Image (cartoon, rainbow, N blue to C red):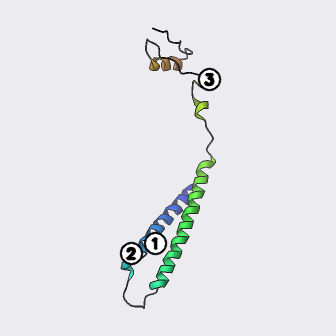
Amino acid sequence: MQQVLIVIHLIVVLGLVGVILLQRSEGGALGGLSGGGGVSGFLTGRGQANALTRTTAILGATFFVTSMILAILAGVHREPKSILDSAPGASQSAPAAPSGSGGVLDQLRQLEQGSGTPAPAQPK
């Protein structure tokens, strides 16, 4: 279902970009290419502006709705996590000081090999 909504969302985005580019603006844009010759056109003058404005509003609302639905669907299966719960040394109140014989990487290797917790560092 999410893939279908993404495809619909992309189609709406492309339509929205196209409709916005077709609108007549002070800068010219692509709206000037739609014709300016007689009154015999299907959508002329005010009718064209109203149709493009209405289409833009509909596509904008559809874009907003599909964005909200996709955001909700993305968060449905997500489990809340805490970085404090997932940290390997969450029960320790202070970080372990590096030992003089190897440093942090040696301590991590000792933890992976199952030798327990590394010994506290001896002051120099």
* Residue named by callout 3: 91
The one nearer the camera, 95 or 17, is 95
Q: At which x and y percent is residue 83?
A: 58, 33
Query: Is the C-beta separation of discs 1 and 2 under 8 Å?
Result: no
Picture quadrant of residue 80: top right
Asked if the residue at tag 1 contacts the one at tag 3, i.e. Cβ–Cβ closer than 8 Å, the answer is no
Determine the CA span between mark 2 and mark 3.
64 Å
Q: Residue at x 61, y 53 (%)?
A: 72
Q: Is residue 1 visible?
A: no
- Could you tell me which secondary element the residue under label 3 belongs to? loop
List x then y, in percent, for residue 75.
60, 48
Q: Position of residue 102 (x, y in %)?
A: 43, 15
In this picture, residue 21 sits left or right of residue 113: left
Q: Specify the label residue 26 is tagged with.
A: 2
The residue beneath circle 1 is 19
Q: CA distance from mark 3 to mark 1?
A: 58 Å
Q: Amino acid at mark 1?
A: Val
Number of other residues with Cα within 10 Å of mark 2, as a class: few under 14, some 14 to 19, many 20 or more:
few
